[in-house]
């Protein structure tokens, strides 16, 4: 007989320690799982300083059987999202749980009750802690490890969440390609012709990121991202403080040649960037950046051959010009020069027909699916 279940609000440092260690307890033995960066997880969960928590509120919970934690969750109230989308939705995130339906239901109920107290009419998640960070439950593609900044979880999570009364809100996909696909696209005469035509007709110029003005460049990327994504499902603009924090975190990780900005008359109108897949090294250091994890993480970046193409974003008034084609073509040469052997396009929302058709036409294969769940309260 299992020990009786208790759902406890996290209120002290010992509970925070158990809450933060939960992913290691749940995913032990899964060769595809990659641990979170410990310091980053702590801050994003609200246990350390992060500007996202200037605008949202949350409460963490642990599921306990006797002295042993068996699951965790974070209830999240995000007024900024509700104002932007004119909704009345609450959120949950950082869900981790053993294959224990009673514990999962108890955790979700605790989050729901907390959201009801704040007048929210539905619960949606997981978001860790918001849409501009990690989100979703992996429901397809468990046999391969995730790329950098993507989630991986046991297959039974979908069953646990659905058993608690949640249904599908939205799906996100990942597509994969290899160096042969990149090489074929680089020789696609039709694509090259379109690229040249757009550049000549509209005066589009594409340049790499300028590392000497890194802070300004990242702000440019994220400003374009905020404006380009305004009609995208669930999008909520990042604040300036979040942008500055994001720039600081990415400074050592971005390769300038793999980040491109499109300009018209000197004005940035579009951007694309690729993130090297640091996950194998994060696994080696077990998510610990300090004191020496940073050294292992960043050493010999030429040795990292997998790249995640995070997004190609173009300001709304330029989206019909073909600027995205110019950005895509501009990434091929530096990616091949870096020695990239595999690439992933993610996340791509199921509702983003244009992006899905574009990568599918280029030969990329869909191989992972994440799902956001929702329940009326």
Image (spheres, rainbow, N blue to C red):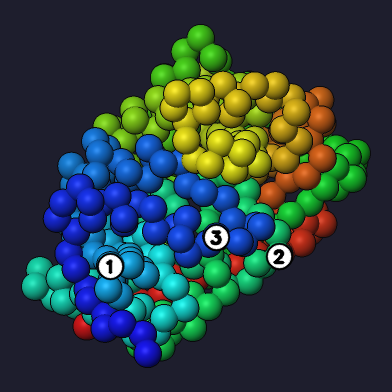
Disc 2 marks which residue? 143
- Position of 218 with respect to 241 (left or right) is right
Q: CB atoms at circles 3 and 1 under 8 Å apart?
A: no
Residue 87 appears in which quarter of the rendering? bottom left
Q: Residue at x 73, y 45 (%)?
A: 343
Q: Residue at x 16, y 76 (%)?
A: 113
- Position of 349 with respect to 79 (left or right) is right
Q: From this view, report whether residue 368 is shown above or below residue 3.
A: above
Disc 3 marks which residue? 28
Q: Position of residue 242 (x, y in %)?
A: 31, 36
Q: CA distance from mark 3 to mark 1?
A: 19 Å
Q: Earlier in the sequence, mark 3 or mark 1?
A: 3
Q: Nearer the viewer, residue 62 or 357?
A: 62
Q: Secondary structure at mark 3?
A: loop
Query: Which residue lies most toward the top here?
Result: 212
One can see residue 100 in this view: yes
- Pointer 3 local density, CA inside 10 Å: few below 14, some 14–19, many at least 20: few
């Amino acid at each position: 007989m299992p020990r009786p279940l208790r759902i406890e609000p996290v209120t002290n440092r010992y509970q925070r320690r158990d809450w933060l260690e939960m992913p290691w307890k749940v995913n032990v033995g899964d060769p595809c799982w990659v641990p979170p960066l410990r310091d980053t997880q702590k801050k994003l969960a609200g246990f350390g300083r992060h500007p996202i928590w200037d605008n949202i509120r949350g409460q963490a919970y642990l599921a306990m059987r006797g002295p042993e934690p068996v699951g965790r969750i974070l209830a999240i109230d995000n007024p900024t999202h509700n104002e932007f989308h004119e909704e009345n939705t609450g959120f949950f995130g950082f869900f981790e749980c053993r294959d224990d339906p009673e514990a999962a239901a108890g955790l979700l109920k605790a989050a729901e009750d907390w959201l009801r107290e704040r007048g929210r009419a539905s619960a949606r998640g997981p978001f860790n802690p918001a849409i501009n960070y990690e989100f979703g439950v992996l429901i397809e593609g468990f046999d391969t490890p995730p790329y950098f900044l993507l989630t991986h979880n046991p297959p039974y999570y979908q069953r646990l969440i659905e058993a608690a009364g949640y249904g599908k809100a939205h799906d996100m996909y990942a597509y994969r390609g290899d160096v042969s696909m990149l090489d074929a696209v680089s020789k696609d005469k039709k694509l090259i012709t379109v690229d040249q035509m757009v550049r000549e007709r509209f005066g589009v110029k594409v340049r790499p990121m300028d590392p000497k003005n890194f802070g300004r460049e990242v702000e440019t990327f994220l400003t374009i991202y905020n404006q380009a994504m305004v009609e995208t499902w669930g999008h909520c603009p990042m604040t300036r403080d979040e942008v500055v924090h994001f720039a600081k975190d990415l400074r050592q990780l971005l390769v300038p040649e793999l980040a491109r900005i499109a300009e018209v008359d000197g004005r940035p109108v579009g951007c694309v960037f690729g993130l090297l897949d640091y996950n194998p090294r994060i696994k080696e250091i077990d998510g610990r950046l300090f004191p020496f994890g940073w050294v292992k993480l960043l050493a010999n970046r030429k040795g990292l051959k997998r790249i995640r193409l995070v997004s190609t974003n173009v300001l709304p008034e330029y989206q019909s010009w073909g600027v995205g084609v110019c950005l895509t073509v501009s990434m091929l040469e530096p990616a091949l020069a870096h020695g990239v052997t595999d690439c992933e396009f993610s996340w791509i929302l199921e509702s983003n027909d244009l992006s899905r058709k574009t990568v599918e036409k280029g030969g990329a294969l869909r191989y992972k699916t994440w799902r956001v769940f929702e329940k009326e309260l």
